[in-house]
Amino acid sequence: MSKYEYYNLEVKGPIAYVTLNRPERMNMMGFAPWKEIMLVQDEIEANRDIRVVIIKADGDHFSAGINLRDLEKADSLSVADNINWLQRVYGRWQEMNPVVIAAVHGLCYGAGFEMICACDIRVAAEDAIFAIPEVRFGLSPDMGGSQRLPRLVGPGQAKRLILACEEIDGREARDIGFVEIVVPREQLYERTEKLAQRIIDNPPWAVRFGKKAINASMDSSLAGGLLLEQVQTIFCCGTEDQNEAIHAFFEKRKPEFKER
């Protein structure tokens, strides 16, 4: 039995599986689930053996978004007191060392949509339906959606999705660049795990620097990004893992990385 109420965390070697596990409530988000996500993230970041995090969901849907009862109780003062840490909850997926992959099926609305915007890679089932309908309820996305979505799909598509609250399916989400991979529902987790394994098979420091450099490229100047590339190359060229990767290639064997 999971020690968490809203999620199940299972660690299998270098992969952590975070499962939204309130299918009877369509895995809705809210203040209590967000507070619990922070505890899940604490546990993940305390385990440096975790290289990839896969976020998935039990039931027919990934997440129906925020519980409107929570939204109904909110006022400007309560939002002002909480919005800063709420935004950090999703941003932490983007900032942590492990690569975070969202495996999405069924409905992925609102707060669930904003969460996967902060993941590194998104794999969708063909039956996935995406929408970010905050404007319909008198709000603009406030957990990073208005900032991350344009970086993924461009400002025009972001405005269409946010301002018109249009729904898109998995294939359209891939066509506009919101998700990277679309597969039949029955292949969702197999394809996600295959992707995770390919990441794990690479040298840990190279993957870590690659994630951080790509994230930085979305905000920094070209000069700043090139400087980060210089730093990571100087560091990685002095590691045992970099030499092991080259030796294994020439010796036609699987490399054994030691993260040093």
Image (cartoon, helix red, strand yellow):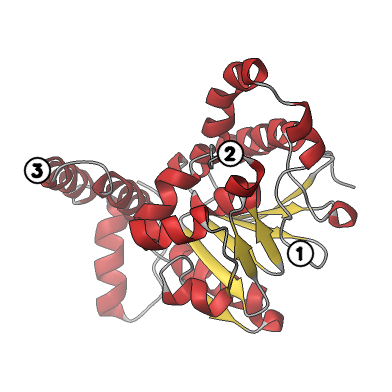
Can residue 255 be seen in this snapshot? yes
Which type of secondary structure does the marked residue at label 1 adopt?
loop
Q: Given the image, on which type of amino acid does mark 3 rest? A: Ala
Of pointers 1 and 2, the one earlier in the residue sequence = 1
Q: Indicate whether 68 appears above or below 257.
A: above
Circles 3, 2 touching at the beta carbon (< 8 Å): no
Q: Nearer the viewer, residue 34 or 237?
A: 34
Q: Given the image, on which type of amino acid does mark 2 rest? A: Leu
- Residue bearing the label numbered 1: 61
Q: Which residue occupies 24% across, 68% down?
A: 246
Q: Nearer the viewer, residue 16 or 67?
A: 67
CA neighbours of label 3 inside 10 A, class few (<14), some (14 to 19), many (20+): few
Can residue 154 be seen in this snapshot? no
Q: x, y percentage for residue 126? A: 63, 80
With 151 as the anchor, is 107 left or right in this view?
right
Q: Given the image, on which type of amino acid does mark 1 rest? A: His
- Residue bearing the label numbered 3: 223
Of pointers 3 and 2, the one earlier in the residue sequence = 2
Q: x, y percentage for residue 151? A: 35, 54
Gap between marks 1 and 3, in whole Å? 43 Å
State the image quarter where residue 210 is shown: bottom left
Q: Nearer the viewer, residue 101 or 127?
A: 127
Q: Which residue occupies 18% across, 51% down?
A: 237
Q: x, y percentage for residue 13? A: 62, 56
Circles 1, 3 touching at the beta carbon (< 8 Å): no
- Residue bearing the label numbered 2: 139
- State which mark lies toward you, 1 or 2: 2
